[in-house]
Image: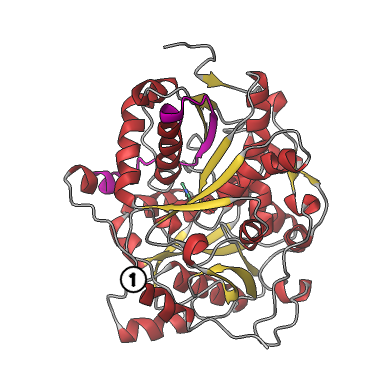
C-alpha cells in the first residue's frame, strides 16, 4: 500500500469556514418559487411566518453568495467541527483499484450524523427571535435527535413526532431525544386531529414521514408561540450543510487533490447538497470539473423515476407547494432500512440542478448497499448508517470501473452518519433476511394521481 496521503486530513478549529455558501447565487436561472397551497400564487414571507423565524425565511429566498455563520452557532459547531476527511487506503487496497477514495465523516457530531449542522442554526435563529419551543417530525430518529441536541444548547423546548414504525423499532433514538430533553410522540398520534383520524382507521398505523410532518406542522400553527423545524429539503437547510463541502475543499487542497467524481446519498438532498454545492461553485467557475452524482434507493427513486412537478411536502397537503422531483405526496415507500431516504420528494434546489443537467442520479438496491458497507466496515472500521451505504456502494462501483479502465480517478463522498443505532438492519443483512423491493410502476402512477394539477 502506498500511503502517499495521510489517512486523516484534519483542519484546526481556527481554519473552520465561517460562511455558508448559497448555490442560488451562481445558477444560470433561479429555482421556481414555492406556491401558496390555496391560491397557487408564489408564497411570500408572510405565508412562512407561522412556521419559521424571519432570519430563516430570509435565508430561504436569499440570492447572496455567502452568509456569515453567527458566533453563537460557531461556538456549538466547535463541539465537533471541523470534521475529518479520510483517505480510504484500506478500502482501495481491498478493491485493488487505482482510484483514490476520500470520505468526509459527519458521524463525529453529537447526534452521529450531519443533521446538527442545520439543527443548531435553526434553534439559534428561533431563540434569537424569542421562540421557546420547536416542533418537528423524525423518520429514523436522526433529525429528531439532532434537533433535541440543538434546542438543549439554547435552553429551548422540543416536541417530536416520530414515525410509528421507527418509534417501535428504534427505542434508543427516542431515548437519545429524551436525554436532550425533548418530548417524543409516536406518529400518527392522538394529539392532533389528523393523527386521531388515521388512528381511528388503523390503530396499528405504521406512519410515514409525510404524516409526521403534517402533525408537527399542525401542532406548530395551533400555538403562535411555537415554530417548526425541517431537517432537509429546504434551501436554508442545504445552505447550512455547505460547511461540509467548504471544509472538504480546504482539506483536499491540503493534499493537492481535486475530485473527478463526487457521489452522495439523497433523501431530501441535504448531506448531498452540503458536500456538493461548494464543489459545484468551483465547477461553474471552471476551476475543477467533477462529475457530481446523486445516489438514491431503488425503493424510493424520486430523481430517477419521479416527475418534476409542484407537490406538497407533507401527506395531509398543508405545506406550500414546491416544484420538485416527486413520487406523489401520498407515496408510502417500502420499509427499507435507510429510513432517512424514504421521502416522496427531493429538495427543490437539487431537483432544479438535476433538470439543468449539473448533476446526475442513479438508484441502488439495499442489498448491494449493505454488501458495500461490510467491505467498508471491514477495512476502514466505521459502521456506516444505512443511508450513506448508498454513497459507499456508488463509490465502490466507480472504483471498480477504474480498476477495469486503469484510470486513477479521485472519488469523494460523504459518510454522513454512523450506524451504531442501526445494527438491527445489519443483523437482517448478515442473517440473509434483507430483501430488495422492486417498485411497481403502478405504485408511482397511483401516488402521482394525488399530485395537484395546476392551472
Ligand atoms: C437524514 C439523513 C439522511 C437523508 O437526508 P438528506 O437530507 O438527504 O441528507 C441521510 N443520511 C443520514 C445519516 C441522515 O441522518
Question: Is 93 drawn above or below residue 110 in the view shown?
Answer: above
Neighbour class for label 1 at 10 Å: few (<14), some, many (≥20)?
few
Whether residue 332 is visible: yes
Rendered view: 338 above or below 251:
below
Q: Quadrant of residue 56?
A: bottom right
Q: How is the image coloured?
A: secondary structure
Left or right relative to 20: residue 421: left
Which residue is depicted at the point 41% across and 35% down? 396
The image quadrant of residue 228 is bottom right
Q: Nearer the viewer, residue 307 or 315?
A: 307
Compared to residue 55, the image places residue 97 above or below, namely above
Q: Nearer the viewer, residue 352 or 97?
A: 97
* Residue located farthest toward the front when viewing the structure as drawn: 405
Who's the residue at 37% across and 22% down the image? 96
Image quadrant occupied by the C terminus:
bottom right
Please tell me whether residue 324 belongs to the stretch shown in magenta.
no
Q: Which residues are magenta?
A: 402-426
Question: Which residue was labeled with disc 1?
Answer: 440
x%, y% of residue 201? Answer: 32, 86
Q: Is residue 149 visible?
A: no
Residue 416 drawn in magenta: yes
Which residue appears at 62% of the width and 57% of the height? 354
Image coordinates for residue 450, horizontal then vertical, percent: 49, 83
Q: Is mark 1 within 8 Å of ligand 1?
A: no
Q: Viewed as shown, does residue 230 lie left or right of 182?
A: right
Amino acid at each position: 500500500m502506498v500511503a502517499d496521503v495521510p489517512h486523516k486530513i484534519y483542519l484546526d478549529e481556527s481554519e473552520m469556514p465561517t460562511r455558508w455558501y448559497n448555490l442560488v447565487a451562481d445558477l444560470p436561472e433561479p429555482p421556481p418559487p414555492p406556491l401558496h397551497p390555496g391560491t397557487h400564487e408564489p408564497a411570500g414571507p408572510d405565508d412562512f411566518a407561522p412556521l419559521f423565524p424571519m432570519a430563516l425565511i430570509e435565508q430561504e429566498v436569499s440570492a447572496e453568495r455567502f452568509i456569515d455563520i453567527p458566533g453563537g452557532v460557531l461556538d456549538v459547531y466547535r463541539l465537533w467541527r471541523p470534521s475529518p476527511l479520510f483517505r480510504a487506503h484500506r478500502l482501495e487496497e481491498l478493491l485493488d483499484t487505482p482510484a483514490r477514495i476520500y470520505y468526509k465523516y459527519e458521524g463525529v457530531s453529537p447526534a452521529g450524523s450531519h443533521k446538527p449542522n442545520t439543527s443548531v442554526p435553526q434553534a439559534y435563529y428561533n431563540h434569537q427571535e424569542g421562540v421557546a419551543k420547536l416542533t418537528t417530525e423524525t423518520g429514523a430518529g436522526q433529525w429528531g435527535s439532532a434537533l433535541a441536541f440543538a434546542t438543549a444548547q439554547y435552553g429551548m423546548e422540543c416536541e417530536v413526532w416520530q414515525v410509528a414504525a421507527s418509534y417501535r423499532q428504534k427505542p434508543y433514538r427516542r431515548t437519545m431525544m429524551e436525554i436532550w430533553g425533548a418530548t417524543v410522540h409516536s406518529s400518527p398520534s392522538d394529539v392532533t386531529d389528523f393523527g386521531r383520524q388515521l388512528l381511528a382507521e388503523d390503530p396499528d398505523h405504521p406512519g410515514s414521514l409525510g404524516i409526521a410532518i403534517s402533525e408537527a406542522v399542525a401542532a406548530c400553527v395551533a400555538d403562535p408561540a411555537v415554530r417548526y423545524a425541517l431537517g432537509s429539503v429546504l434551501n436554508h437547510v442545504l445552505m447550512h450543510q455547505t460547511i461540509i463541502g467548504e471544509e472538504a475543499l480546504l482539506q483536499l487542497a491540503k493534499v493537492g487533490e481535486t475530485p473527478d467524481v463526487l457521489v452522495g446519498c439523497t433523501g431530501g438532498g441535504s448531506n448531498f447538497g452540503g458536500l456538493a454545492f461548494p464543489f459545484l461553485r468551483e465547477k461553474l467557475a471552471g476551476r475543477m470539473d467533477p462529475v457530481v452524482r446523486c445516489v438514491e434507493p431503488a425503493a424510493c427513486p424520486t430523481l430517477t423515476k419521479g416527475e418534476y412537478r409542484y407537490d406538497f411536502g407533507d401527506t395531509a397537503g398543508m405545506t406550500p407547494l414546491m416544484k420538485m422531483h416527486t413520487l406523489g405526496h401520498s407515496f408510502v415507500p417500502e420499509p427499507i432500512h435507510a429510513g432517512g431516504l424514504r421521502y416522496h420528494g427531493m429538495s427543490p434546489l437539487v431537483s432544479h440542478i438535476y433538470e439543468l443537467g449539473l448533476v446526475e442520479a442513479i438508484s441502488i438496491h439495499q442489498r448491494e448497499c449493505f454488501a458495500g458497507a461490510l467491505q467498508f466496515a471491514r477495512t476502514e472500521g466505521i459502521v456506516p448508517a444505512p443511508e450513506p451505504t448508498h454513497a459507499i456502494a456508488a463509490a465502490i462501483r466507480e472504483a471498480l470501473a477504474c480498476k477495469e479502465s486503469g484510470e486513477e480517478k479521485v472519488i469523494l463522498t460523504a459518510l454522513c452518519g454512523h450506524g451504531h443505532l442501526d445494527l438491527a438492519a445489519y443483523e437482517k443483512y448478515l442473517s440473509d433476511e434483507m430483501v430488495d423491493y422492486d417498485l411497481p410502476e403502478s405504485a408511482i402512477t397511483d401516488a402521482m394521481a394525488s399530485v395537484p394539477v395546476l392551472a
